[in-house]
Image (tube, rainbow, N blue to C red):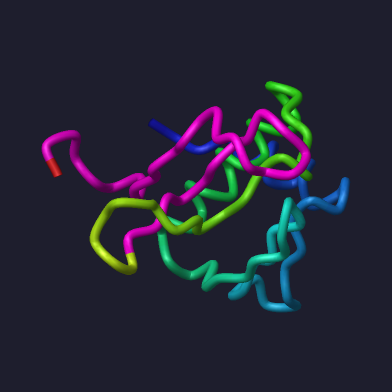
Amino acid sequence: MSLDMTLVNQAEQRGYLIFNEDHTKVTYRCGRIYSDDYTNPEEKVRAAIYGWLIIEKGYPANRIEVEVPVPRRTPGDRANIVVFFDDARDDPYLVVEVAANSVSTTE
């Protein structure tokens, strides 16, 4: 599967994603601001899915959070992307776990 980098570019043009000058760091403008290392292959997948959720699926950015602690799980467990029903981001609707594009389905 190849990533649709067009969605990443559109999300950047619309201000949902911000990159530093050398594209090594990405900042997500969603329910809360979150930044991470864009050189990590998994981060490219997360950015593409984030763009898809907003641009293609129409979810409001203010109802999305990135790296959300998962309750009742191992301390430090985090969901990559969570879409919420409500603006207060109290009621989760969709949880997305991403993996690098090179990871096999068994991994």
Does the magenta portion include 82?
A: yes
Quadrant housing the N terminus: top left
Question: Which residue range is magenta in the image?
Answer: 77-106
Front in this rendered view, residue 66 or 57: 66
Image label count? 0
Report the residue at 72% width, 33% height from top.
86
On screen, residue 14 versus residue 73, left or right, reads right
Residue 43 at x, y percent in the picture: 49, 58
On screen, residue 70 versus residue 84, left or right, reads left
Report the residue at 74% width, 56% height from top.
17
Front in this rendered view, residue 86 or 12: 86
Residue 103 at x, y percent in the picture: 24, 46
Residue 65 at x, y percent in the picture: 62, 50
Return the residue found at the far top: 57
Residue 46 at x, y percent in the picture: 51, 48
Does the magenta portion include 102?
A: yes
Quadrant housing the C terminus: top left
Front in this rendered view, residue 49 or 79: 79
Give above or below for 42 relative to 107: below
Report the residue at 38% width, 43% height from top.
97
